[in-house]
Amino acid sequence: MFRTHTCGELRINSVNNEVTLAGWVQTIRKFGAITFVDLRDRYGITQLLFGEELNQQLDTNPLGREFVLQATGTVHERSNKNSNIPTGDVEIIVTSFKILNKSAVPPFTIQDDTDGGDDIRMKYRFLDLRRNAVKKNLELRYAVNRATRNYLHQQGFMDIETPFLIKSTPEGARDFVVPSRMNGGQFYALPQSPQTFKQLLMVSGYDRYYQIVKCFRDEDLRADRQPEFTQIDCEMAFVEQEDILNMFEGLIKSIFKEVKGIDYTEKVPRMTWEDAMWNYGNDKPDIRFDWKLLNLKKPSSVYTNKKDSSELITGASFGVFDNAETVVAIAVPGCSDYSRKQTDELIEWVKRPQIGMGGLAFIKCNKDGTYKSSMDKFFNEEKLKAIAAACNASTGDLVLILAGAEERTRKAISELRLEMAERLGYRKKEEFKLVWVLDFPLFEYAEDENRWVARHHPFTSPKPSDIEIMISNDPAIENAAEYLKHPYANIKANAYDMVLNGNEIGGGSIRIFQRELQEKMFAALGMTKEESLHKFSFLLGAFEYGAPPHGGIAFGFDRLCAILGGSESIRDFIAFPKNNAGRDVMLDAPSTIDEKQLVELQIRSTAK
């Protein structure tokens, strides 16, 4: 062995022991006849002291940053201790050393506060991975992996691998495809998820399956997406929705306990998709702060059982409200003292292309009991007070109001809610709040294609009470403008999402397991019988051989790690991520391939 101990192992009780360490040179500090070197490995840093004799050797054979060094010496207690590192009470008085390998000057400093930009660090990712901050992220990722496996093993789950080279099937995103040399002109697809395989495993009798598995989707990227990502993929047979929720609520609580030391003892709350959209503007609400939306005017076509306060805001000749499809507000606590400059800045914020609103109205609930608004010309103070009261605003609050088309306005008010909470410190990274969102619509209507599409995926079962509606009605739509009146618009999915701090970390459903219902689902999605047999004959055939009731869930492993690590981006928790263009800049991939390979694959490139 090149070492007797790691660079993070030695403590005061090791004093007078002779040891050998090996690692990378972090820093070099020369003081006259002696030199101090911080030696680093995966486990930590230990200070080395080179006395006068060895210092002379360093003069003729100098060390540099990131040199690989082996050093032997005696552990001594440090006179000038460093409380910032675990090994800070000791140092090694070096008696001999050997440079195992030299290093070129690194393109950036390898420390937590590095001077390397994102692009250069990704190009030299093998160096970036030496940084302590990145190492901690990968350690957390491993801890989540280990905690997951421990829990699922204890619950009787079996880790079963499924293939990566499969058939291309529609699952919502573009497939990555792989040409087959042995079957010219034909292609494999990389799995967007192991969905059909885990259902087949249920048919095979493996009633508790899981994988921590790579999945692949060819879609546009952002901070929380990568072309290849990891899922905690699980499936259970002979279960209902309640069984799934309880099992995987337990999984996340176990991860909190093992990885973060958090006893999450409270029951995870549940809300319907409709309530989430009505109260928070999206289906992944951040409930760390209890600012619910106030729906002053609801669209006529949805939320039929909800009540608004339209009588307060219409009829005042304020066209912004009168002509809007919907008007939504939030009451932001303690911001009535916002200056004109601050409210103007918020107006410009909602006008940004990412938000897409034309403007913002506000009411200040002043601490002296008066009300000041951007709508003073249209609403008197008594009316402003009534609108603020409808928004559950208190003295000192600032009411922010958006109006416009339903989808855009609800998305914008949701983003504004999160932005204000971020500015005011309500979105604490070390506070974790879970919620289940249930009862999603089974279908969405794609007007441009004049057909239904699955909101989750084509294998999601309707709620038991809605199965008959689906079977007994024709999915065809005669008048596209009135699709909301079709019975399919009201069918609820037997599906569920787990949301953590405003991020969907897991989603799943009870699956269809009868052939007749699955064929009806495919037909609703516009597939002919021939198409469904071509793409899914293996699954439909399996349902003929005693498929049990089953359901499952998949957690976004990278995203879960990022949230637990306090990061906005999953890239920080992946050893070798792609950039926002889907490129691996370290490997320079994707890249062209040799003409010989193209010929073998019977592919002709049209790229210029």
Image: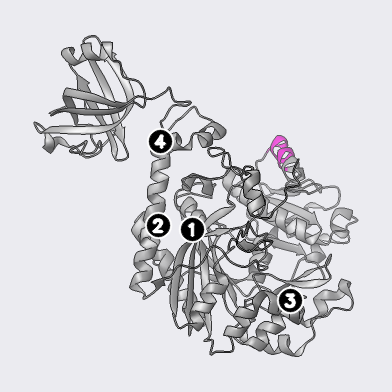
Amino acid found under the numbered disc labelled 2: Val
Q: Secondary structure at mark 3?
A: helix
Residue 356 belongs to magenta span: no
Of badges 3 and 1, nearer the viewer stands 3
At 17% from the left and 28% from the top, the residue drawn is 72
Please provide percent x and percent y for residue 497. 56, 68
Please provide percent x and percent y for residue 605. 72, 48
Decide which of 203, 449 is in the foreground and name it: 203
In whole angstroms, how far apart are the C-alphas of marks 4 and 1? 22 Å
Q: Which residue is mark 4?
A: 131
Q: Which residue is mark 1?
A: 557
Amino acid found under the numbered disc labelled 1: Phe
Point out the tag, 1 or 2, that comes first from the N-terminus: 2
Q: Which mark is residue 144?
A: 2
Q: Does the rendering let one see residue 301? A: no
Q: Which residue is mark 3?
A: 531
Highlighted magenta segment, given as a residue range:
339-346
Bin the neighbour count of mark 3 within 10 Å (Cα to Cα): few under 14, some 14-19, many 20 and up: few
Q: Secondary structure at mark 2?
A: helix
Amino acid found under the numbered disc labelled 4: Arg
Point out the tag, 4 or 2, that comes first from the N-terminus: 4
In whole angstroms, how far apart are the C-alphas of marks 1 and 2? 8 Å
Of badges 4 and 3, nearer the viewer stands 3
Relative height, residue 153 to residue 333 (above, below): below
Asked if the residue under mark 2 is in contact with the one under mark 1, i.e. CB atoms within 8 Å, the reply is: yes
In whole angstroms, how far apart are the C-alphas of marks 4 and 3? 51 Å
